[in-house]
Image: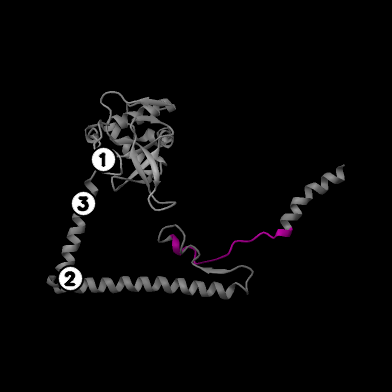
Amino acid sequence: MSHQHGPGCNHGPSQGGGGGGQQTIQVNDANKAPAIYKSTASYLKDAKKSGLKPRQGVFNGKRFEYFKGKRGIDALLKEEYAKVVSKGEAVPKTRDEAFNILNDLGKFGFLLRVDRGESISGKGSPRLLQPNSVQEIKEDGYYMWIWEGSQFRVYIGAALLVATILAGVLFPLWPNFLRMGVWYLSVAVLCLVGVFFGIAIVRLILYIISYPILPRGFWLFPNLFEDVGVVESFIPLYGFDPVKEKKSKSKATATAPAAVEAKAD
């Protein structure tokens, strides 16, 4: 499945050539694209909703996220994507329809087809990315995000960071009651951290003591390190190791049907 981008596609002549130097790629401004394509791009970039796990690559010395065309088409065919599409907009039901949406994302400047090179520092590290000379959509191709999405949160985060740094620098000029409040707050946080580590040490000691004595190891707050909420971490108060099935019983149950068949013969 492939499609050659026609006039108005997202790529233009590149400048700089090969040799690992800087390359300039002329692309359309994705922010001027229709709202449906912005929503689609936001959906694909959200790994929790789309299931499209991004990979890390390096292009022009900067890190970019990229994905495989097949995975992008699979994400557009999920039921979650139907919730993103506005009323009146067509929801893709076939791979060809999903392919056309990816193709439009490329035309509007959201994506750029790239070729993967070698890893920059061994296995598991980001790969070098180079723009493909033929910008076409293929299921086995790789596509790099050149659209960064809304920068509102980035600007808010930067403003908060600057405000926090300035507040820290001007700490000696704070009123006494604010400085005392910060001191009490820091002491309270340290106490909470100390209590948490104390509980962790006590529960480990209890487990070590109970392991040779009881049939199953005893745990205080068994969900303390589980992936649950803060309240759920302390519920229940105590618990035991799960029951382990004995190998002899499992072997007996496995050989029982064979014995019955032998008698039947």
| Quarter assignment of residue 261 | top right
Q: Is residue 1 left or right of residue 39?
A: right
- Residue position for label 3: 156
Amino acid type at circle 2 is Leu
Q: Is residue 91 visible?
A: no
Q: In the depicted view, which residue is nearer to us: 265 or 68?
A: 68
Q: Which residues are magenta?
A: 232-248
Amino acid type at circle 1 is Gln
Q: Residue at x 42, y 25 (%)?
A: 96
- x and y, in percent, of residue 28 in the image: 23, 32
Indicate whether residue 245 is drawn in magenta. yes
In the image, residue 154 above or below residue 248: above
Amino acid type at circle 3 is Ile
Q: Residues within 10 Å of mark 1 (few under 14, many from 20)?
A: some
| Quarter assignment of residue 161 | bottom left
Q: In the depicted view, which residue is nearer to us: 209 or 100?
A: 100
Secondary-structure class at tag 1: loop
Q: Quadrant of the N terminus?
A: top left
Tag of residue 200: none
Secondary-structure class at tag 2: helix
Residues under labels 3 and 2: Cα distance? 24 Å
Indicate whether residue 147 is drawn in magenta. no
The label nearer to you, 3 versus 2, is: 3
